[in-house]
């Protein structure tokens, strides 16, 4: 069915307020396992112990199964306990209009993220960093600088600062905001001290 | 942060979201920010097996662009027992999902690294290498890591693990897929029986001269050892 307008967060919110009701347990323990098992059987999906696939027909079946999983199940909103469904056209509209490339960072330190393919000869972008690992306040800048100093690293992914001004960044406290702001500033400073002030984070 | 930094919003396991995240997306859209939609599907979790988890991973990738208007999706299939992205099963999920997304869409995708072992150990570097090979060969655009020691121990990550991720990616790019699969299998065999007794490694302070941000001779030697093992398996740096 032709969509009336492209899906966005506002439409998602509206649907999350009026979609079909379901308990989270039913979603987690019935909908997800039953549908994924059903689709595996329907499309005969078997990876045959390969890490990187060479069977394009099987990849096609996996894509159909994943698409159908999203189309038939939708997304569960944990706050409203309702299901947000998309139409097939809405999903294709999003797939067909994705950003095909973008730039992370600024100046000579910026990198362009663009499409790769299976077996591509171009090296992927390396986003180096602790990836959410806990980092002490004292070591926060040196740890991130160790990534910015590596030429193999193109952009930085942050760790989590365990204290700020000696206090834990408890959620929904002012310390949480201070920690988030401080993390960003220290990572930018670490990149600058490594001679790469424009690195994306 | 500025618009050209990655602004994160996370989906919940599996195919779930909360309304705070939807409001965050509205904020990012309002600033024309680069949006990184993140989610780590769990092997052995709600979806179950390898293929079932990959089906959910494909759905999650697509949802990143339908719901979150993402610039890119940050993946990270993780093992429910070991908390690692570097197991045989999670590598297969990541490899098949990424190759499929690359083949049938223009979506841009990254993957996160959570090895069992800690810094300054060969196991940690080999775990990161197996995933870097899988990601690079399957068409992944961004490699994000490395959260050594499963990303749960304070100060146990360093730039050296990211160096290995990058060097292995450079060596893998353009390789024959059959050869890549053979080497990954060899690398995984080197560590897959050791998850329960994975070496915890050392902290950043023990791995680096903190004043000069220089890795210790010990870590450089461990790094060379891991690299040599990869070369013996057929990877050409």
Image (cartoon, coloured by chain):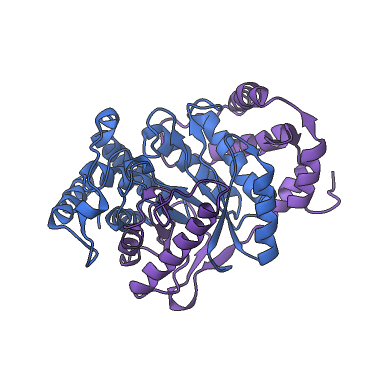
Chain colours: A purple, B blue
A95 to the left or right of B77 = right
Residue B148 percent coordinates (x, y): 32, 45
Looking at the picture, does residue A27 appear above or below residue B91? Answer: above
Q: Is residue A54 visible?
A: no
A113 vs A35, left or right, is: left
Q: Specify whether residue A131 is in view.
A: yes
Q: Residue at x 51, y 40 (%)?
A: B40
Rendered location of residue B105, percent (x, y): 61, 51
**Relative height, residue B6 to residue B110 (above, below):** below
Q: Nearer the viewer, residue B86 or B13?
A: B13
**Which residue is at 62% across, 27% downward?**
A32
Rendered image quadrant of residue A68 = top right
Which quadrant is the N terminus of chain B positioned in?
bottom right
Q: Is residue A173 left or right of residue A192?
A: right
Number of marks in the rendered image: 0
Query: Which one is nearer the viewer's eye here, B122 or A15?
Result: A15
Q: Name the spot of residue B149 as percent of width and height, x first.
A: 32, 41
Residue B89: image location, x then y, percent: 41, 32
Point 46% across, 41% down: residue: B94
- Residue lying farthest to the bottom in this orientation: A107
Image quadrant holding the C terminus of chain B, namely bottom left
């Amino acid at each position: 069915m032709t969509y009336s307008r492209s899906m966005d967060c506002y439409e998602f919110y509206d649907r999350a307020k009026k979609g079909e009701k379901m308990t989270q347990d039913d979603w987690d323990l019935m909908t997800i396992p039953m549908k994924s098992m059903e689709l595996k059987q329907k499309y005969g999906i078997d990876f045959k112990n390969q890490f990187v696939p060479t069977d394009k027909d099987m990849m096609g079946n996996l894509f159909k199964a994943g698409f159908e999983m999203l189309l038939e199940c939708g997304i569960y909103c944990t706050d409203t306990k309702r299901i947000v469904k998309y139409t097939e056209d809405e999903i294709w509209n999003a797939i067909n209009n994705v950003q095909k490339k973008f730039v992370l960072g600024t100046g000579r330190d910026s990198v362009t993220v663009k499409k790769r393919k299976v077996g591509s000869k171009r090296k992927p972008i390396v986003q180096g960093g602790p990836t959410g690992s806990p980092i002490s306040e004292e070591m926060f800048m040196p740890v991130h600088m160790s990534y910015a100093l590596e030429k193999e690293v193109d952009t930085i992914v942050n760790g989590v600062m365990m204290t700020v001004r000696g206090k834990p960044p408890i959620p929904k406290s002012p310390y949480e905001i201070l920690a988030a702001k401080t993390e960003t500033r220290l990572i930018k400073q670490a990149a600058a001290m490594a001679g790469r002030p424009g690195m994306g984070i | 942060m500025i618009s050209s930094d990655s602004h994160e919003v996370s989906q919940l396991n599996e195919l779930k979201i909360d309304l705070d995240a939807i409001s965050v997306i509205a904020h990012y859209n309002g600033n024309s920010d680069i949006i990184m939609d993140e989610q780590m599907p769990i092997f052995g979790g709600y979806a179950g097996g390898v293929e079932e988890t990959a089906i959910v991973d494909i759905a999650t990738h697509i949802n990143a662009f339908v719901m979150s208007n993402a610039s890119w999706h940050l993946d990270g299939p993780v093992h429910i027992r070991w908390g690692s992205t570097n197991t045989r099963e999670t590598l297969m999920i990541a490899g098949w999902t990424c190759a499929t997304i690359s083949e049938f869409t223009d979506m841009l995708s990254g993957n996160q690294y959570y090895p069992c072992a800690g810094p300054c150990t060969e196991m940690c570097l080999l775990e990161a290498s197996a995933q870097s090979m899988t990601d690079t060969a399957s068409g992944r655009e961004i490699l994000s890591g490395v959260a050594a020691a499963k990303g749960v121990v304070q100060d146990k990550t360093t730039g050296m693990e990211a160096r290995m991720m990058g060097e292995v990616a450079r060596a893998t790019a353009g390789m024959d897929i059959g050869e890549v699969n053979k080497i990954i299998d060899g690398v995984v065999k080197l560590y897959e029986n050791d998850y329960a007794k994975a070496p915890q490694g050392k902290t950043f302070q023990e791995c680096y001269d903190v004043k000069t941000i220089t890795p210790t001779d010990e870590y450089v030697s461990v790094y060379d050892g891991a690299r040599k093992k990869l070369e013996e398996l057929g990877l050409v740096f």
